Image (spheres, rainbow, N blue to C red):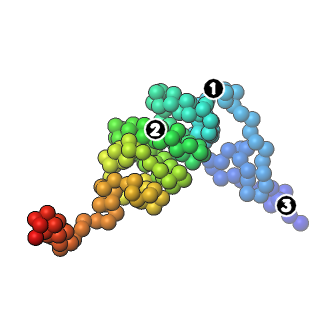
């Protein structure tokens, strides 16, 4: 027959909250702290509230840019994933990229690049301003890959072609040069 000490639940490891579920069963949720309504929203709640389609979230994202919110790049990613109209997304993606390039924070740059990559993949389009800003970013990013894979190549700039295809062989350039000079010279 087991003693009462042997039937007791094992002690919780240090660092676990009292209301956290234990491996052997679920615990009741803790009540929210008394000042929970004054606390800042969690990043996921902020993204859900600011990245859904409709005119409200887009204006909220614009206001977040004006306030200099840290998570506005993440909200632009959410907008790129959820909004059906690329003409509403691309100006905000460009603004996120522009803001990221002015900052020294690599996370902000990555957020702008990921938003552009999602827009290219889901909507198969890009605008000139985003391409101009992307050119200032290091090559080999998600946006480079998704633009090459999903946007019609005739709409892509020469520098992206050059990055993807590499330098042309010198022998090929000489042949093209000779062919062009021969065609112009009339001989």
Could you tell me if the residues under marks 1 and 3 are in contact, i.e. CB atoms within 8 Å? Answer: no
Left or right? Give the position of 18 relative to 91: right
Left or right? Give the position of 182 relative to 84: left
Crowd tier of the residue under label 3, counting other residues whose Cα lies within 10 Å: few below 14, some 14–19, many 20 or above: few
Depth order, front residue of 170/179? 179
Tell me if residue 27 comes above or below residue 42 in the rendering.
below
Q: Which mark is residue 5?
A: none
Residue at 84 percent of width and 57 percent of height: 4
CA distance separating discs 2 and 1: 32 Å
Tell me the mark number nearer the camera, choosing from 2 and 3.
2
Tell me the mark number nearer the camera, choosing from 1 and 3.
1
Which residue lies under the disc numbered 3? Answer: 3
Which residue lies under the disc numbered 2? Answer: 91
Residue 153, percent across and down? 40, 59
Tell me if residue 164 comes above or below residue 80 in the rendering.
below
| Quadrant housing the N terminus | bottom right
> Which badge, 2 or 1, comes first in the chain's sequence?
1
Residue 137, percent across and down? 34, 49
> Which badge, 2 or 3, comes first in the chain's sequence?
3
Residue 46, percent across and down? 59, 36
CA distance separating discs 2 and 3: 69 Å
| Secondary structure category for the residue under label 1 | helix
Q: Residue furthest right?
A: 1
> Which badge, 1 or 3, comes first in the chain's sequence?
3
Which residue lies under the disc numbered 1? Answer: 38
- The answer to which image quadrant residue 154 occupies is bottom left
| Secondary structure category for the residue under label 3 | loop
């Amino acid at each position: 027959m087991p003693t009462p000490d042997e039937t007791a639940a094992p002690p919780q490891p240090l660092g676990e909250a009292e209301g956290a579920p234990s491996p052997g069963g679920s615990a009741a949720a803790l009540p929210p702290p008394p000042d929970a309504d004054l606390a800042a929203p969690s990043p996921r709640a902020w993204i859900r509230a600011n990245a859904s389609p409709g005119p409200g979230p887009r204006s909220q994202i614009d206001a977040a840019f004006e306030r200099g919110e840290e998570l506005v790049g993440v909200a632009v990613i959410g907008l790129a994933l959820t909004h059906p109209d690329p003409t509403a997304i691309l100006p905000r993606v460009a603004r996120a990229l522009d803001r990221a390039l002015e900052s020294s924070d690599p996370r902000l740059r990555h957020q702008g690049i990921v938003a552009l990559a999602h827009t290219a993949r889901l909507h198969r389009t890009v605008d000139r301003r985003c391409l101009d800003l992307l050119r200032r970013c290091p090559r080999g990013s998600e946006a480079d890959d998704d633009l090459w894979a999903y946007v019609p190549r005739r709409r892509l700039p020469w520098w992206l072609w050059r990055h993807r295809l590499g330098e042309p062989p010198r022998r090929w350039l000489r042949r093209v040069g000779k062919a062009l000079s021969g065609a112009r010279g009339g001989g």
